[in-house]
Amino acid sequence: MRASGAVLVGGQSRRMGTDKALLQVGGQMLIERVVTALRAVAGEVLLVGRDAGRFDWLGVQTLEDVFVGGGPLAGIHAALSSARHPRCLVVACDMPFLNIDLLRYMLRQADGWDAVVPRWQERLQPLHAVYTPTCLGPIEGMLSAGDRCPLDLYPRLHTRFVTGAEIAALEEGWLSFVNLNTPDDLILAPKLASLGDWEVTAYPLAGLGVIQGDNLPVTC
């Protein structure tokens, strides 16, 4: 499949207190886990954001934002501006359990759409989404106007929303959206990964303690 993968690495990790991308889950750095997942589904991998060159040792292309200070939306813009392929899968650097089957499923849905965005537990996942070059114009217009919210982009696009039912049909598809923002998240992540699908149904993600507040979606 002709696709690019982009990892946003420009966050400041304030709540974690250290560079999240370098923390270990399951004996592997977060950034390594994410890059490995993207390499399984994409023909190229890009690392995008402030000081992305600190990851040159991974052997993948690194990019700085064109719209400096534009947040995740600027990262999406930079990724699309440099991606070689017509589909660009954009994820955050702190998602340790990316589900390969879900990523492939989303990439397959992209034909005829500007973006493919999952909706899990009624929340959109803009940093676990597929974007195409047709998004560049609307994103540039938003950033130029000072609008940095990725959620404001979708009404401007022909957007395919992946439903909760589609995600639930894939084994442990929900785990793909877990991201780590605090030391408590890091401690509890292995426990979250051990839950079965039936337990997730019984205990919604927002109540697990690992993912609360704005950890799941990007809020604007």
Image: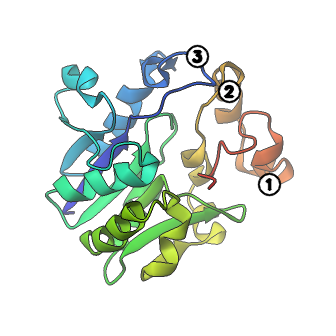
Element class at badge 1: helix
Residue beneath the point at 18% across and 63% down: 2
User: From the viewer's perspective, is residue 14 above or below residue 84?
Assistant: above
Q: Is residue 97 left or right of residue 131?
A: right
Find residue 49 and report its horizontal and vertical position in percent.
33, 38
The residue carrying mark 2 is: 185
Element class at badge 3: loop
The answer to whether residue 169 shows anywhere in this view is no
User: From the viewer's perspective, is residue 65 above or below residue 31?
Assistant: below
Of the image marks 1 and 3, the number of the one nearer the N terminus: 3
Residue beneath the point at 18% across and 34% down: 60
Task: Give, as a three-letter code, the residue at label 2.
Answer: Asp
Q: Residues within 10 Å of mark 2 (few under 14, many from 20)?
A: some
Q: How far, Cα to Cα, is label 3 from label 2?
A: 12 Å
The answer to whether residue 108 shows anywhere in this view is yes
Element class at badge 2: helix
Q: How far, Cα to Cα, is label 1 from label 3?
A: 32 Å
The residue carrying mark 3 is: 17
The image quadrant where one finds the N terminus is bottom left
In the drawing, what numbered circle is on residue 201? Answer: 1
Find residue 158 and report its horizontal and vertical position in percent.
42, 83
User: From the viewer's perspective, is residue 50 above or below residue 66?
Assistant: above
